[in-house]
Image (cartoon, rainbow, N blue to C red):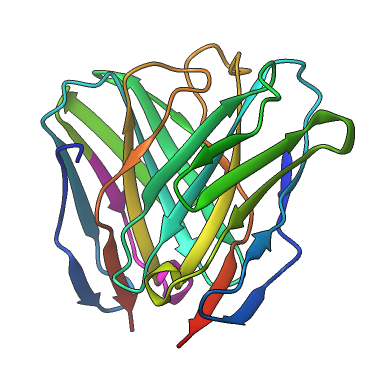
Amino acid sequence: AQKVTQAQTEISVVEKEDVTLDCVYETRDTTYYLFWYKQPPSGELVFLIRRNSFDEQNEISGRYSWNFQKSTSSFNFTITASQVVDSAVYFCALSEARPPRGGADGLTFGKGTHLIIQP
Amino acid sequence: DAGITQSPRHKVTETGTPVTLRCHQTENHRYMYWYRQDPGHGLRLIHYSYGVKDTDKGEVSDGYSVSRSKTEDFLLTLESATSSQTSVYFCAISELVGGDTQYFGPGTRLTVL
C-alpha cells in the first residue's frame, strides 16, 4: 500500500525566511509519480509540480525548489525568501504508474502542512 | 486553468436526505475522480471513472455512489446523508492514467445537520 507522510502539521516563519516542507513516501512500485499541490485560504487546489521516479534531478522554479531523493524516499519542497502570499496548506501526493485495477487510480495524499508566513 | 466546475458550491442538508453533487468538465478528459477533504486526513479518494459508464470504488466509498453518462459530467450521490459525510468534496480530472497530473475543481462544501 502507498503512504505519504507530511510530519510537519504547521510551520510559521517570518517573511523572507527560507522554509522547507518535508514529504516522505512509501510505495512498492519502482515507477511512480510525486506531486505537490498548494491550497491557499480561498480553498482551491493548485498544482505545483509532478516528478517521476526516474528523474532525481532537483527542480527550481523561481523561489520554489524541489529535492527528490529516492535513497530516503523523500520529496521535499523549499520556498526561498518566503512571502505572505505563500501562506497556504501544501500537500504532497503519490501516484502509481500502473494502477492495480487496470482502470485508473487516485492520488494518495499526505495530510498537508499548513504554512504561515508572518509579515 | 482546467475547465472544471462543481455544483453546488455550498450545501446544507439534513440527515437522511439524498444529495447529488455535480462535476462538469470542458477538457474532454477521460478520467474523473471524487475526493473528500477532512481536517487531519488530507484528501481521500471516494470513487473514480475511467470512461462513460465505467466507474470504480476508491478508499472511502461506503455511503456514496457515482454515475457518468457523459464524458463531461461525473455525479456523486449520497443516498441518505449522514453527519459523517460533512466535508469538502473535490472533483478532479486527468487526461491519462498512471501518474498523469490531476486538476481539481473548486470544491463543494457540504454540511449535513
- Residue B13 appears in the picture as rendered: yes
Nearer the observer, A75 or B109: A75
Q: Which quarter of the figure has residue B86?
A: bottom left
On-image quarter of the N terminus of chain A: top right
Q: Residue at x 51, y 69 (%)?
A: A82
Return the x and y of residue A26 as percentages of the image width and height: 80, 37
Q: Which residue sits at x=81%, y=29%?
A: A70
Residue B59 seen from this side: no
Q: Is residue A102 left or right of residue A18?
A: left
Q: Residue at x 59, y 62 (%)?
A: A112
Q: Quadrant of residue A72?
A: top right
- Magenta region: which residues? B75-86
* Image x and y of residue A11, in percent: 64, 76
Residue B32 drawn above or below residue A84: above
> Is A88 inside the magenta-drawn segment?
no
Q: Position of residue B16 (x, y in %)?
A: 32, 71
**Quarter of the image with the C terminus of chain A in it:** bottom left
